[in-house]
């Protein structure tokens, strides 16, 4: 948090408004679909970042027709060859067989034997395709039409061509059709006593064993306006330590496949040759372009079937999504958090650190949620977080510029950089909105005035008067600033300066330093009067003498004026006494030599702090105008001359 930062109601409300505005802007952009691609890419990253799971593919085997098999068995694959493959698989007693090869028309020879094999074995499931758009549908084998040995193999690539969703049911208006993967999973689960049921809490949802599958809606997760027809779920593409076993047609027909690779498993038969266009991108694909890994369609269906069985038996459901309202609340929360924390950022590196830290935390939350089966949006909250933090930081930066300008206006241009920086860092201690908060301080006040200014100015033209006065004012104001003082006010040729404001002094050491600085400043001003008089003589201008009064005591510091014109000043007894000391017995002050060009009078309170360090003589005690009590008055002559032993005892060189 930046130094001096303080939450006020105004800044708090500003941060909340910024956070809400950015969050709702992100929600509008998201609802328009502009973030869907980025959110789906983030989902793919989460899929790839998952640790591999052991033995999740042990229930499925794939018999693939490779390029070598095509060369050996010929193309297209005949019904006779396909029947031989099915017979070889059935010999090893699998629980279910899926044939991911279209057979809507006969491919002789061996068609009658092939149909007879299908009708005798209910464990065999063949495929059909509904098709969509320009993609034509494909009918199932005629002999199995309208039977429960048919499953559709339609897959659902998203707009970017990646398959993330799978269908369990489709309704063409006449009948409900099952997906190939679901048909195979149900046959496998029969021996475990598991069947498809309606979920008791929600009869519209499918339940398999230990898992209920909630269908995807059109705006679930990162999707916007998705075609949600049918019963869709997100496919669990978690990597396995041991991938799905794949065997070739040739090895199977040659008797080179061990029985355990098939017994009691789901077996899928399909193409695994690049010459057959049955390849799909999945979240496991690392990127578009050459070399991007793709998955054969038969492997996608095998993957889905295996995960359905796992979900039913082990209770591992597909990735779930939160409701739309929860996702909106999640995004708004990050926007509000960014808006609030952005108020505390004072520099680009702090903003960068906070922004990066928030993104890391958000990424970790999204990743841990995904490991526990939840797809939590990460891109919209990240945008809300960074956008709100950036705008909030810019808002505070603008507010600080305005406050600093006001602060500098209050303390004038005669505020040293060191004091200005200290005032800015500790502004919350004495700033109250646009005004300086009144403070009771111990300060040393200095008043100076030129002797006979009015008389001399009447003998000069206006331009010369201003140049003559400004040369004096500029020189003395710079000396005050150099000695740590604040030029409080000008009045004609008079100057009022405060030592010990606006930051409160807490110790006697600090008060003593202010008093010494004021006296040192007055001596420097006296020296400058000698130089200024020489300068004025050279230009045939009048010379002058100067009176200075100094007093240390309590003052009240604050701002006077209205919103259009504020002035920081001090009032109190110390101010009055310093002014009275400057004008004390001014009629008797007559300069007789260069050494008499400046008279410096200090009160007894100041003398108590600086007496041992300066040559001074007591003028006397006097009752100053406006007071009943008396004070001792001292005239400062110069610095005290000390012996070497005294300097060592005082800790000074």
Image (tube, grey):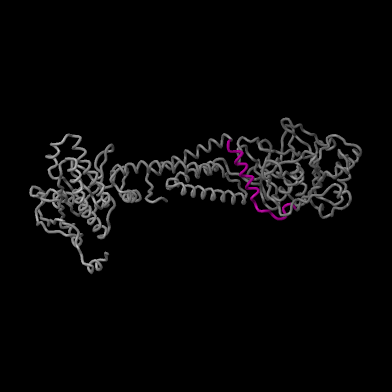
Q: Which residue is depicted at the point 37% across and 42% down? A: 401
Between 452 and 261, the residue placed more toward the observer is: 452
Q: Which percent across, then down, holds residue 414?
A: 28, 45
User: Can residue 117 be seen in this snapshot?
Assistant: no
Residue found at the far front of this picture: 538
Q: Which residue is depicted at the point 16% across and 54% down? A: 602
Compared across the picture, whether 555 is left or right of 334 comes to left
Q: Is residue 603 above or below residue 401?
A: below
Q: Which percent across, then down, holds residue 147?
A: 80, 38
Q: Which residue is depicted at the point 85% across and 49% down? A: 89
Compared across the picture, whether 539 is left or right of 222 comes to left
Q: Which residues are magenta?
A: 34-57
Between 372 and 516, the residue placed more toward the observer is: 516
Query: Is residue 602 rendered magenta in the image?
Result: no
Q: Quadrant of residue 259?
A: bottom right
Query: Is residue 40 rendered magenta in the image?
Result: yes
Q: Which percent across, then down, holds residue 67?
A: 83, 43
Q: Which percent across, then down, holds residue 372?
A: 61, 51
Between 169 and 298, the residue placed more toward the observer is: 298
């Amino acid at each position: 948090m930046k130094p001096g930062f303080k939450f006020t109601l105004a800044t708090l409300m500003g941060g909340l408004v910024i956070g809400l505005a950015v969050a709702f802007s992100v929600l509008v952009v998201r609802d328009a679909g502009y973030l869907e691609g980025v959110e789906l890419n983030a989902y793919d990253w989460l899929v790839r970042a998952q640790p591999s799971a052991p033995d999740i593919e042990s229930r499925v085997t794939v018999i693939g027709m490779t390029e070598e098999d095509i060369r050996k068995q010929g193309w297209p694959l005949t019904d006779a060859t396909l029947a031989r493959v099915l017979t070889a698989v059935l010999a090893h007693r699998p629980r279910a067989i899926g044939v991911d090869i279209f057979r809507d028309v006969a491919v002789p020879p061996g068609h009658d034997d092939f149909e007879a094999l299908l009708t005798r074995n209910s464990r065999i499931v063949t495929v059909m395709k509904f098709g969509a758009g320009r993609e034509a549908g494909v009918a199932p084998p005629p002999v199995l039409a309208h039977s429960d040995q048919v499953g559709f193999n339609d897959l659902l690539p998203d707009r970017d061509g990646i398959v993330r969703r799978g269908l369990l049911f489709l309704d063409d208006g006449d009948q409900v059709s099952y997906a190939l993967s679901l048909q195979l999973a149900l046959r496998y689960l029969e021996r475990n006593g598991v069947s498809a049921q309606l979920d008791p809490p929600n009869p519209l949802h499918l339940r398999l064993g230990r898992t209920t599958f909630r269908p995807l809606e059109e705006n679930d997760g990162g999707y916007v306006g998705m075609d949600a027809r049918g019963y869709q779920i997100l496919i669990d593409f978690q990597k396995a330590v041991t991938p799905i076993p794949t065997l070739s047609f040739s090895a199977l027909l040659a008797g080179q496949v061990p029985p355990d690779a098939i017994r009691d498993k789901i077996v899928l038969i399909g193409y695994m040759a690049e010459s057959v266009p049955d390849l799909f991108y999945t979240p496991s694909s690392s990127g578009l372009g050459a070399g991007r890994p793709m998955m054969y369609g038969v492997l996608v269906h095998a993957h889905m079937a295996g995960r359905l069985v796992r979900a039913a038996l082990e209770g591992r459901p597909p990735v779930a999504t939160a409701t739309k309202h929860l996702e909106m609340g999640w995004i708004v929360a990050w926007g509000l958090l960014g808006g609030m924390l952005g108020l505390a950022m004072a520099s680009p590196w702090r903003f960068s650190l906070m922004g990066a830290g928030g993104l890391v935390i958000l990424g970790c939350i999204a990743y841990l949620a995904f490991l526990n089966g939840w797809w939590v949006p990460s891109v919209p909250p990240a945008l809300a977080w960074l956008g709100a933090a950036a705008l909030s930081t810019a808002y505070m930066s603008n507010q600080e510029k305005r406050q600093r300008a006001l602060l500098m206006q209050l303390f004038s241009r005669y505020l040293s950089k060191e004091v200005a920086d200290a005032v800015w860092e500790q502004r919350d201690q004495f700033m109250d909105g646009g005004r300086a908060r009144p403070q009771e301080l111990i300060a040393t006040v200095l008043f100076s005035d030129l002797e006979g200014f009015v008389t001399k100015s009447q003998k000069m033209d206006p331009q010369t008067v201003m140049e003559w006065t400004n040369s004096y004012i500029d020189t003395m104001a710079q000396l005050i600033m150099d000695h740590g003082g604040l030029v409080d006010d000008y009045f004609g040729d008079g100057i009022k300066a405060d030592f010990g404001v606006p930051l409160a002094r807490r110790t006697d050491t600090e008060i003593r330093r202010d008093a010494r600085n004021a006296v040192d400043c007055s001596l420097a001003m006296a020296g400058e009067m000698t130089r200024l008089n020489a300068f004025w003589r050279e230009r045939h201008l009048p010379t002058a003498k100067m009176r200075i009064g100094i007093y240390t005591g309590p003052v009240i510091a604050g701002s006077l004026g209205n919103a259009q014109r504020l002035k920081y000043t001090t009032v109190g007894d110390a101010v009055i006494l310093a002014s009275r000391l400057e004008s004390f017995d001014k009629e008797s002050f007559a300069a007789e030599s260069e050494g008499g060009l400046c008279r410096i009078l200090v009160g007894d309170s100041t003398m108590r702090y600086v007496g041992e360090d300066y040559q001074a003589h007591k003028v006397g005690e006097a009752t100053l105008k406006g007071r009943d009590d008396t004070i001792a008055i001292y005239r400062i002559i110069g610095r005290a001359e000390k012996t070497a032993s005294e300097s060592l005892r005082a800790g000074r060189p």
